[in-house]
Structures are given as C-alpha cells and as structure tokens.
Image: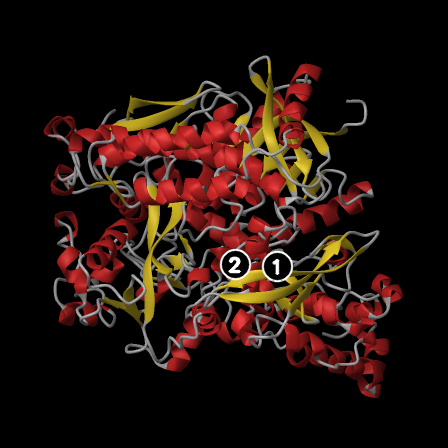
Amino acid sequence: MTNLEKYKYDVVVIGAGGAGLRAAVEARESGLSVAIICKSLFGKAHTVMAEGGAAASMGNVNSGDNWMVHFRDTMRGGKFLNHYRMAELHAKESPDRIWELEVWGALFDRTKEGKISQRNFGGHEYPRLAHVGDRTGLELIRTMQQRIVALQQQDARDHGNAESHMKVFSELTVTEIIKENGKVAGVYGYWRESGSEVLFDAKSVIIATGGVGKTFKITSNSWEGTGDGHALALRAGANLVDMEFLQFHPTGMVWPPSVRGILVTESVRGEGGILTNNVGERFMFKYIPEVFKNIYADNEAEADRWYLDQDNNRRPPELLPRDEVARAINSEVKAGRGTEHGGVFLDVSKRLSAEVIKKRLPSMWHQFYELAGVDITKEAMEVGPTCHYVMGGVEVEPDTAAAIGVPGLFAAGEVAGGMHGSNRLGGNSLSDLLVFGRRAGMGASEYAKKNGENPVSDAAIKAAAARIEAPFSRTGGENAYSLHAELQEITHNLVGIIRTGSELQEAIEKIAAIRARSANIAVAGDRKFNPGFHLAFDLDNMLLVAESTAKSAILREESRGGHTRDDFPGMNNKWRQVNHISSFDGDKVSVRAQALLPIPKELFDLFDIHELEKYMTPEEITKGGSN
Amino acid sequence: MARKLNLRIWRGDSTNGGLQDVVVEANDGEVVLDVIHRVQATQMGDLAVRWNCKAGKCGSCSMEINGKPRLACMTQVSAYGDDETITVTPLRAFPVIKDLVTDVSFNYRKAMEIPAYSHPENLKPGEARMEQVDVERSQEFRKCIECFLCQDTCHVIRDHEVNKKSFAGPRFFIRIAELDMHPLDTLKNRKKTAQEEHGLGMCNITKCCTEVCPEHIRITDNAIIPMKERVVDEKYDPIRWLGSKIRKREGIV
C-alpha cells in the first residue's frame, strides 16, 4: 500500500448536495480543513431537482406565520412521529438560513415590498416557501457552490493556494468509513475516473449523501440516490431510524416511459392545479381524512374561493400532505378511473393564463413540452405516484447531528432520520438541509477540535482495498445491472405504496436471495470510469437499505404517513410511541422497537388538546407533555 | 412500439479510440440517454457516460449527437429518421477521459477566477429589499445548469486550444453579467475585468452559445452584447474618459 493516495483533513464531508455544502461552509468558517467528496461533478447533486421552495416562517406574505405555526404543521405532516427537537430547531432556524443565502448572493423571487416572496404548499398553513420560479434547489446549490468558491478564493489570498484548506474531490465514491479504537478515523474510496484508491485520514466525518430512490423502480431520484450514506453508517455501527417511511410523491410523470417518475412539482397544485380522474371528477374531496376535515374544503366552490381569500375559506384538498394525495391517486387508478397510462389528470390550464403558467412554472412547461409533447398551458398533465424521499435515516442527536453510537460521525439532510416523522412536508427538505447541514458542520468541527488524530491502521486499509478488488477477481458471475433491476421489481411490487405482511415477508426473503447472489458479481472491463463496477458498490448499499425498509415495515402494524399496510389500514396511536431502529452486524440487518421521546410541555402546549387526541393515547394527553 | 435503432458510439480514451456501431432497441418516447443506458446494460457494461437527473436540470449528460452539442436526456430518438444512424461522441472542446466522458475541469478553474459576490457590509441578513424586475435580469443567468454546451460550441476555444488560457467562455460571461446586474453586488469594474482578464473582446457574437443553451438563456443578447457595449462606452466616450481622469474614480459603473 506504499503507493496509496492519501490525504489528511480535520473534517471530511461525504456528499456535495445542499446539506454537505452547507456543512462544509460551516466547518471551513470555523477554521478547519475540509474535504468535500462527491460521486458526481461539483454542482450536480440531486438538490438541483428541488423545485417548489424552502419552507421558512419569515412571515413575508402572511405576518401571522411564525416558528410555532411551522412546528405544528411539520408535526402534523409527520403524524407526530417526528423527533420533536429536530422539528423545533428546524422551525426556529429556517428563516436565518434563508436570509444568510442572500448574503452569499442568492436571488429569490420578491414580494411587492421587495422582501423574499413565499408560496403556498401542501400542509403549510401559510404561504411559506421561499422560491425562485420552480428551480429553487438549483439556486441553493449554486449559491453554496459559489460560497465554497468564495472561501477558496479567500484561502488563495491568505495562504497562496485556493485548495490549501478546502478541496472538492469530484467523482469519487466512498466505500468505507473506517473506525479505529471505536472512533471515526477516516474514509476509503476510489476515483470513478481511474478506479484508483484513496484514503482520507479524518478527525470527523459528515455523511450527507441524500436518499435511496434508486432502490425503487419508479423514482424521481437521480442515479446517485443509492442509499450510500445509509449503508456506510450501518456498516460503521450507526443506527437507522424508521426506514419503513418512504415518501411517494403524488405527482410524477407517467408518460412517456423514459421519463416515468420524474417529478411534477407540488407548486402546480399550489398555484391552482386540480386533480381529476378519467370521468372528469375532482376526486380529492372524497379523500379528506378525519384529522384534516376542519382545514380542508369539502366542496369545489369553497376550494376555488380559497385562492382569492385564504382567511375565510378552507384549503383545496389537492393541497393535503403528500401521503394523502399519493394514496388517493393510487386508489383512483386501482378502481379503474385512471388515465390511459395509469395516472390521473393534473390541470392548471383552466385556472391560469398561458403567460402566468410560463412565468411561475417555467421548468414544468419546458419539461412537459420537450419530453412529453404536452403544452400544459392548454392541456392536462398525466401524473402518478413516484418514490421521492426517504423519511428514515441515520439516528442523530438533534443539536449536533452526531450519529448515535459512532463518535466522530455526523449526518445531515435526507440521509438523517427523525426530522420529518412518517411524512415530510414539501419545502421542508431544503430548509432541513440548511439547518442541519450547518449544525452537522458545527458538531463535526467541535468534535474535531476536541479529538486528536486517530490514525488508520494497515489492516483497515487492506480490508477496504480487498473489498474493492473483489468483483474484478471473479469471472462469469452475476451481472450488477440485472440484479439491480430484480431488486427494483421486488421493492416496487412488495415494499411499495401499499404493503401487506405476507408480501413483506416474501420481500425480505427475496432481498436476502439477491444479496447472496450479489456476493458473486463479476465486472467486465477494467477500473477506468466503469459504470458496471460502480453499480456493484451502489447495489450493495441499496440491498442494505431495502432489507432495513422491509424489516421495519413488517413490524409496523398500522398505516401512517409514508407507510400504508393494507392489512392494518388505520393509524393506531399505540404505534406513535414507537421508532424502529435498524442496525447491522456485518451479516444481516436487525430491527428493534424503541420508545419515542415524549414531547416537552412547552411544545405540547402549542397544540389544541382536541387535535392531540387524534394522535395520542389518553394517558399521554393526561400527562400533558414531559417536564 | 419498439424498433431497432442504429447507434454509433465513440469509444476510447485519451490515447486512442473510434466509432463503434451497435444495434439497440428503442421504444416510443425514449431519449438518446435511454438507448445509451440500454446499450450499457445489455452490450457494453463498461461504457462510460455521465448523467444524473435525466430531466434536463443538472447538465451532466452533455455530448455531441450527430455533431451537435446536446443533452442526451433532452434529445428524443424520434427527432431522427427511422433509418437514420444516430452518432454520439464526447464534447470536442474538452479532453476525453473515456468514451463519452470528458475532462471539464477547465470550467471549474475558470469559475475560480471570477471574483465572488460581494454583499454590502452594512446590510444585515433579512434586510435586503429588491424589486422583482431587478432580480429577474440576473435570475435569467442563474438558470444556468452548467452543462458547458456553450463552452463546447464556442469556436474561440473549440477550434483554438491556445485561447483557453485567456478566454473564460460564455458560461462565465453570464456569471460575470449576473453579478454585474445583481442589485446588491458592491464589487466595481466587473465589465472591465471581463474585457481585460476574461477575454470578452475575443467573442465575435456569432450566437452559437445561445443556440445550444438548453435553458434558452439569451447569452449573447442579454449578457455579452450589453457588457461589450458598456465597456466600449466607458473606453471611448470622451466626456466619461475626461471625468474619470479628473475625479480619479475607479472606473464608472
């Protein structure tokens, strides 16, 4: 291993999406050296796909908004399974994180008074999403990418070298987080371009790798969403929490097949888009759950009036939280009221003029016009559910984003669990990655300052290197592409939007069988930019994620948020008190129940007691929050 | 309906390579990236291609399709005739790494040379007030997805490797224009440095960049030409010239 390429950094950030970049900025500003590792080119992360906006209770459009209202909406959206402290920090700190982006050059859309404009979104009581047309994620990524460049330019002035204290390692895959003496010591991986291996000695490591969508057949996620961080954390001894909760975004494109799954932003509904079935019925009125009856309109007239007068009318049911809308669409299609291509209609052309649609939803217009040949200013879109977001993720300490059980390891953004409970509200992910990206940067920096170097042993390097070499030493084994396709079929059919106990059991067995076969993957060609080789490692990660999801899902005998059991249709308050914790022993994933922390009194008191009765047991209500 | 498609793919690396013919199935509504993926999964497991979002939002799958710089995810197979062979090659302006993947680090080096946004010192977070009409000018340029197709097509670098040192390219002219038009940016002289340090003068406004931009950013009309005009105004307007000498101001905004 004498020729091994080696680096030494205080903090290593895995992932260069919103959370990773925000964490890197924070760590560098605290004076430390930082490596940013990304699987793609710098600036291509999946965050660019976020369209609608970033939720923050700035109150620019409706001054009634504040952190408490945002906190309540987030908890409701997550069906009270959220880690209360994460939801609290998120609601309190989001406005500062948005304003800070302006200091770095971001240009959000404005109100008439010149403040940052905010738009309506599902589950948010007030217009709350700071946005830039429908390309808000791109604005976030670019702003932070340019902030990183600004910090590097400062280093060039101060130290004579732009990369002296912070460097972006693009197109590099991490295969292992290495621990020594029970603490994080570094990370190991390979350059995608050459296949050659790299070791980073690190005092602390931040995982910010995003989601797991590629585990599923129909997804809005890019190729990078292969659950790398989830699997790296599991393998390093950290826990995953609540992996049964996957968000199926209600509106993905369904036609043509090549774009199946690609997102149609919720802003289409926020701007007045309505959902109809193949007989022209505006069906969402049939699907308003009991817990939401007082805030959603049950007739078209009132729903339509809401767009003009939001204070005196209830919201249209198209703006229910995503899990409700996805299930409703699923039911309509199953009942034979779907479109030709298995979706429903989403129409914004009847409410807004062509000019306004092109102004407010430019990427959507573009996307449908160029990819589906549909002009959304004149005709309806065909949409259906698509795997969009994983609520579950690494179990962390809310204030520091430290991964529980692994000193020196931190996680933020989609890869972290707890914040969104059983269902995420649209707009809460962009603010999540800013709030907790910064906190992970702070937590990891503090840890790195307190802890000295922890050298990586030769034995650890050898083991990591052997794992990378393995698929090349086999010939005539399994094909990674086919195994991936098989896995996606299983998750789609057996662990998808609607689940049952027997199917989940079948899924667990089938996933284990694929995992056994994956140990025999052989790779054609050499190490140089070889996608077959890359997929072999991505697949390993997806298999662990799928196992964790299926095993968590079979335990939860109720339907809540992003987990629907056909055999246990209702929400059961008993299950609200339980988190599912996944861990990995090197051989298989095990899942155990863990009691959810009770909500402290001051947060408990923010809710109407009658609302809490819908979610909590009588004993919890009597207790009235913890002290 | 599936049909057989003749695809010609450039395969190789920095040392050598050439076009290889394959026949691959293509279905209704598919884009070029779909059929490349099918080739990868069924015939050439190690075929190198960059891609991410597959929705025209990340700018990763840039390549040349029948000689034109395009995003493979936004190019419909049906745009070509049934008997037509589709030829895919790597971006010509950048060094090949492998197959359809090129080394685009030139662009990241240029990004590092553009001075960052500079916020007014006394303006605290949350205090900024801007008119929508004023932010829209810069927002047009911030739509850029950094696919670098404009850089690839620009003949100043496409045909003259030697110019790369002194020419930032259309992507970075819109970056400079975006900062120059940013309602709050405090750094002066952005246009002047565009001319003197980043090679704005070498652009002879053939508009090739605008033509290939998948985001339809009016690179030439809205960024390059206005900057060129203002630079010329400042340089050759005798009254402004005199004013700048007498009052010893650092350039004129």
Q: Position of residue B62 (x, y in %)?
A: 64, 62
Q: Position of residue A316 (x, y in %)?
A: 21, 63
Three-letter amino acid code at the position of disc 1: Cys
In this rendering, the answer to whether A420 lies above or below A370 is above
Q: Is residue B131 visible?
A: yes
Q: Residue at x 57, y 58 (%)?
A: B58
Outermost right residue: B162
Q: Give yes or no for contact between labels 1 and 2 (Cβ–Cβ under 8 Å).
A: yes
**B152 or A542, nearer to the observer:** A542
- Res. A280 image quadrant: bottom left
Chain on which label 1 sits: B
In the rendered image, which quarter contains the N terminus of chain A? top right
Label 1 SS:
loop
How far, Cα to Cα, is label 1 from label 2? 8 Å
Instruction: Examine the image and state in which quarter residue B91 appears.
Output: bottom right
In the picture of the structure, the residue carrying the numbered disc 1 is B61
The residue where tag 2 is placed is: B54
Looking at the rendered structure, the kind of residue marked 2 is Lys
Please identify the residue farthest to the top as the structure is shown.
Answer: A181
From the top left corner, tell me how far across and down residue A609 is, in percent.
Answer: 13, 39
